Image: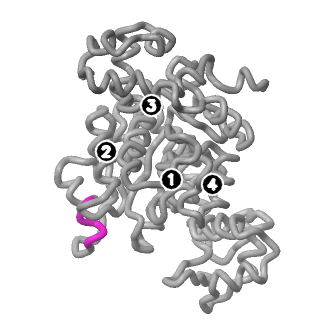
């Protein structure tokens, strides 16, 4: 794809306007509605902009004085070097579901690929500080749903998000990470390998400039994109104060389905997800529960999803030590051979297996989902 085809038409102008002071998604949309095009907004005077709903004279002056300060040319050059492409709301490649929310990002930065099949998306979110149970459930649902053709969305944070992305990757499915920072930064830094794997099997996306740092103030806005790009959100292990609950609340505002995995009643990590169930979120225990929650769309997919899930379960529930039935990849065989029925720390596996840390992490997740190994606290593993 040639450079001029890679990014949206007039993307430099869109970047200049969206980076002006006090121009968020809603104000951006109102400006376009009033003036008809980005070109006209960029040429409008402060006195003309005050006619727009929600814009007073002070705000109009701030927009007028800062709309040309962002160096769009330098940003596009950085994006090209990083292999990032940038689209705007008028681009046919812009995600259909995201365009339907009331505050869609005017521009999106994308590293990887977006496909029409990504409209069949489910978000899996939860706490950064999670239990082994939470990680297993996030990985299990991501694996089964991904194997059935769903794209798995999450935020690439530690804990549940990371487990969800890895579960989808272990099923050779598509997964999309929505970042709370610019794509020139990888956060958390230990997910560098995961970032690379996601861009090869989906995409990492952001609405923020490339060099934006992962500040706490960015994450609520990031969560709205996760909710907006998907048909529904599954919450796994969220305490009462959690970004996952923000994602769930926004999903409800966007008229999307909210589901939750039940957790231990005495665990603070499950208070938020269990509260969602009390408030009417769909309690899910299986992928069939997910399709049921999706209503008409889910009914159309139910037979296919059930058949796919059953095939995956047959692999997972095969005799635990009959490894040949599971058709392990070469990487999985190497990792499995490094393990015994006594705990083995991940550092020892890395030292013994001639594989990258990312391949080892993906292989360990896959072996767990197939019922061959078990993870213990402290990043140790053993054969079942």
The mark closer to the camera, 1 or 3, is 1
Which quadrant of the structure image shows residue 358?
Answer: bottom right
Magenta region: 268-272
Q: Which residue is mark 4?
A: 195
Marks 3 and 2 close (CB-CB < 8 Å): no
Q: Does 316 sit left or right of 22 as displayed?
A: right
Label 1, label 3: how far apart the Cα atoms are: 18 Å
Q: Which mark is residue 105?
A: 3
Kindly report the secondary structure that dominates the magenta region of the rendered protein: helix
Q: Dividing the image into 4 quarters, which one contains the C terminus?
A: bottom right
Tag in front: 1 or 2: 1
User: Residue at position x 52%, y 55% from top?
Assistant: 156
Question: Element under label 3?
Answer: loop
Q: Quadrant of the N terminus?
A: top right
From the top left corner, tell me how far across and down residue 90 is, in percent.
Answer: 52, 17
Query: Is the Cβ of the residue at disc 3 closer than 8 Å to that at disc 4?
Result: no
Q: Is residue 252 left or right of residue 132?
A: left
In this picture, is 195 found above or below 258? below
At x 44%, y 37%, the residue is 230
Name the residue beneath numbered marker 1: 213
Q: Nearer the N terminus, badge 3 or badge 4?
A: 3
Indicate the secondary structure of the residue bearing disc 4.
helix
Q: CA distance from mark 4 to mark 1?
A: 16 Å
Above or below, 306 against 216 in this view is above
> Residue under circle 2?
258
Q: Nearer the viewer, residue 263 or 126?
A: 126
């Amino acid at each position: 794809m040639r450079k001029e085809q890679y990014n949206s038409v007039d993307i430099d102008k869109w970047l200049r306007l969206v980076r002006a002071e006090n121009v968020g998604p809603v104000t951006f949309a109102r400006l376009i509605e009033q003036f008809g095009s980005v070109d006209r907004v960029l040429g409008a005077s402060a006195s003309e902009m005050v006619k727009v709903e929600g814009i007073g004279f002070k705000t109009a002056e701030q927009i007028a004085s800062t709309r040309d300060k962002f160096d769009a040319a330098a940003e596009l050059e950085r994006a090209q070097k990083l292999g990032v492409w940038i689209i705007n709301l008028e681009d046919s490649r812009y995600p259909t579901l995201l365009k339907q929310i009331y505050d869609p990002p005017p521009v999106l930065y994308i590293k990887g690929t977006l496909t029409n099949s990504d409209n069949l998306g489910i978000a899996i979110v939860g706490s950064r500080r999670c239990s082994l149970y939470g990680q297993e459930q996030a990985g299990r649902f991501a694996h089964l749903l991904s194997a059935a053709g769903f794209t798995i969305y999450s935020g690439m944070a530690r804990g549940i998000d990371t487990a969800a992305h890895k579960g989808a990757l272990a099923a050779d499915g598509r997964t999309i990470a929505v970042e709370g920072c610019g794509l020139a930064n990888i956060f958390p830094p230990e997910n560098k390998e995961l970032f690379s794997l996601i861009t090869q099997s989906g995409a990492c996306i952001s609405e923020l400039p490339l060099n934006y740092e992962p500040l706490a103030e960015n994450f609520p806005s990031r969560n709205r994109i996760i909710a907006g790009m998907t048909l529904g959100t599954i919450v796994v292990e969220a305490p009462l104060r959690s970004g996952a609950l923000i994602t769930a609340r926004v999903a409800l505002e966007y008229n999307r389905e909210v589901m939750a995995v039940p957790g231990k009643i005495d665990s603070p990590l499950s208070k938020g997800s269990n509260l969602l169930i009390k408030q009417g979120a769909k309690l899910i225990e299986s992928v069939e529960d997910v399709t049921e929650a999706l209503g008409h769309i889910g009914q159309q997919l139910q037979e296919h999803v059930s058949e796919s899930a059953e095939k995956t379960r047959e692999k997972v529930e095969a005799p635990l030590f009959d490894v040949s039935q599971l058709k392990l990849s070469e990487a999985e065989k190497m990792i499995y051979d490094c393990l015994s029925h006594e705990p083995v720390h991940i550092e020892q596996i890395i030292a013994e297996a001639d594989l990258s840390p990312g391949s080892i992490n993906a292989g360990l997740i896959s072996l767990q989902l197939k019922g061959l190994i078990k993870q213990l606290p402290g990043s140790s593993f053993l054969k079942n």
